[in-house]
Image (cartoon, rainbow, N blue to C red):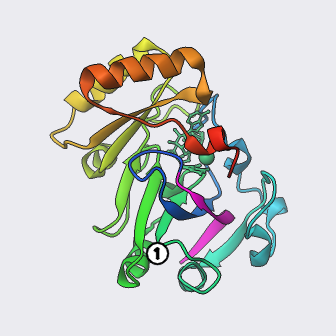
Amino acid sequence: MQYPVNEIFQTIQGEGHFTGVAAIFLRLQGCPVGCSWCDTKHTWEVDPANQVAPQQVINVAQDQPHWAYWSTTALVDLLTGPQYQAKHIVITGGEPCLYDLTPLTQLFAERDVQCQIETSGCYPVLCDARTWVTVSPKLGMKGGLDIAAQALERANEIKHPVAKQSHIEQLDQLLAQTNNTPAVALQPISQQKRATQLCIDTCIERNWRLSVQLHKYLSID
Ligand SMILES: C[S@@+](CC[C@H](N)C(=O)[O-])C[C@H]1O[C@@H](n2cnc3c(N)ncnc32)[C@H](O)[C@@H]1O
Ligand SMILES: Nc1nc2[nH]cc(C(=O)O)c2c(=O)[nH]1
Ligand code: SF4
Ligand SMILES: [Mg+2]
């Protein structure tokens, strides 16, 4: 299987359950969801004119709309090889669940590296059973996509983006739709002060976790 890769880099996971863990990020290209506040808009289009050589997506200095095809085996060999030290892999995007992540996540599991997917939940999550799935629901975005029931059932964690009170109410409605009992984290959108205070107050009240995009506070990737 070939995946369109936007970038590969090693950093500290700044969001959700694994915040603080050293991780290799694999960012796939392509997303039709259209969140107005998306911090990775350069990953939305898989434009054939922006295809580059595989080596050009490694440790990219700035946000680029470019992408390169990488095969499952080439990715697993690279990410478990001597160039990287982290034992946790984050597959993000773009929207990684546009693609069947089963071969990739199976091979990572066989090599004893922990794997995590960051997804909007707009598509079924196709991956190994050992993979940690973080769903960040996208309700009412420009792309007009709804949450996929399978993604809600598969989620190990719901990391909900929050700007205002109605986003908490939407999350309550979503949780009422499932028998799954994922961990819940609230993530303020774009580090807004009011959103952050709302998340803090709600997390204390509900006994949920706060996810603050630590990497943005630290000015790291
Ligand atoms: C860029 S998305 C890529 C993965 C997938 N498309 C998704 O939305 O989960 C990675 C994470 O960043 C979050 N995110 C994107 N832009 C953000 C922003 N401006 N403020 C807070 N979180 C943001 C998303 O909600 C998601 O949890
Ligand atoms: N450090 C760091 N942590 C992250 N957690 C989720 C990210 C993402 O873009 O999916 C991200 C990211 O881009 N950088
Ligand atoms: S689903 Fe994720 S990548 Fe796509 S627009 Fe929304 S935040 Fe950005
Ligand atoms: Mg990010």
Residue 140 x %, y %: 49, 25
Q: Is residue 169 left or right of residue 98?
A: left
Q: Quadrant of residue 191?
A: top right
Q: Is residue 124 visible?
A: no
Residue 179 x %, y %: 15, 40
Residue drawn at the location 60% of the way across and 77% of the way down? 84
Most extreme residue toward the left is: 179
Rendered view: 146 above or below 69: above
> What span is colored magenta in the figure?
1-13
Residue 175 x %, y %: 25, 31
Magenta-span inclusion, residue 7: yes
Rendered view: 162 above or below 214: above
Q: Is residue 63 left or right of residue 100?
A: right
Give the residue at mark 1: 104
What's the residue type where badge 1 is placed? Leu
Residue drawn at the location 64% of the way across and 76% of the way down? 70
Give the camera-side residue of 191 and 50.
191
